[in-house]
Image (cartoon, rainbow, N blue to C red):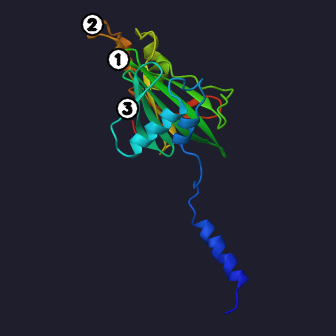
Amino acid sequence: MKFNLKAYAAAIMMAAALVPQYAGALTAADYFVSAPPEVLLILDENTRLDMIDYFSHGLPNTSANSLKGRSRVILNEPQKIEVELSRDATMQIALVPYKSDTLVAVIETVLTPVADSSVRIYDTDWNAVRNQPTLPGVSDFVSPERQKEAKNAEMPDMAFMRISFNPATNTFNVQNTTAGYYDESDRPDGLAMMRTSLDLRYNGTNFEEVKSNTK
């Protein structure tokens, strides 16, 4: 039987087309392992690998960190990993598509005692990008149609929020946790004007709100 070079080449091309687009690409867990000390100081690389292994095998094990606490992985998806650093702190590392590139978002949430998050954006070599996003303030949680009303109301001094990256939409969901900072007796009137959540997208310069189709 003769060897058909054209048919062989076509078969190779077809097989390559069937390989998933992201096959071999680094996952959020890979970046969790490679994160430098300035990003994740309290866990060494071997401990991080153990944590991923425990989660992958469904084991309840926690791992000691350098602050004499216990840490564990609580979510591991290709585009996002979430780690319970301690009883009062969590970290998400998420891969954020941006144009033809990928950025790495590090979201840290601390109970103060109300949940409050910070976000830092890096390139895939762990260099902090020049334009770091500004987190929403009190007025950003007020819908446009109530902005005028809010100017004459007693508003909270600052906003607290819990932030999580949503790989399905490539957006940052921001849950407003400000109400938890106040007792019922001392809540400012304007607190009721603040929306419960926002969906934001990083545009390379800052966060921009993603408008919902529903009210």
Q: Which residue is mark 3?
A: 62
Q: Is residue 188 above or below residue 84?
A: above
Q: Nearer the viewer, residue 9 or 44?
A: 44
The amino acid sitting under disc 2 is Ser
The amino acid sitting under disc 3 is Thr
How far across and down, in percent of the image, does residue 62 sit?
A: 37, 32
Question: Is residue 136 found left or right of 15 in the rendered image?
Answer: left
The crowding category of the residue bearing disc 3, from other C-alpha atoms within 10 Å (few below 14, some 14 to 19, many at least 20), is some
How far across and down, in percent of the image, does residue 42 sit?
A: 50, 23
How far across and down, in percent of the image, does residue 135 sit?
A: 53, 22
Q: Earlier in the sequence, mark 3 or mark 2?
A: 3
The amino acid sitting under disc 1 is Ala
Q: Earlier in the sequence, mark 1 or mark 3?
A: 3
Q: Quadrant of the N terminus?
A: bottom right
Q: Is residue 113 above or below residue 38?
A: above
Q: Quadrant of the C terminus?
A: top left
Q: Residue at x 45, y 9 (%)?
A: 157
Q: Which residue is mark 2?
A: 185
Give the number of the disc on residue 179.
1
Q: Earlier in the sequence, mark 1 or mark 2?
A: 1
Quarter location, residue 188: top left
Is residue 89 visible to us here? yes
Residues at marks 1 and 3, CA–CA distance in whole angstroms: 32 Å
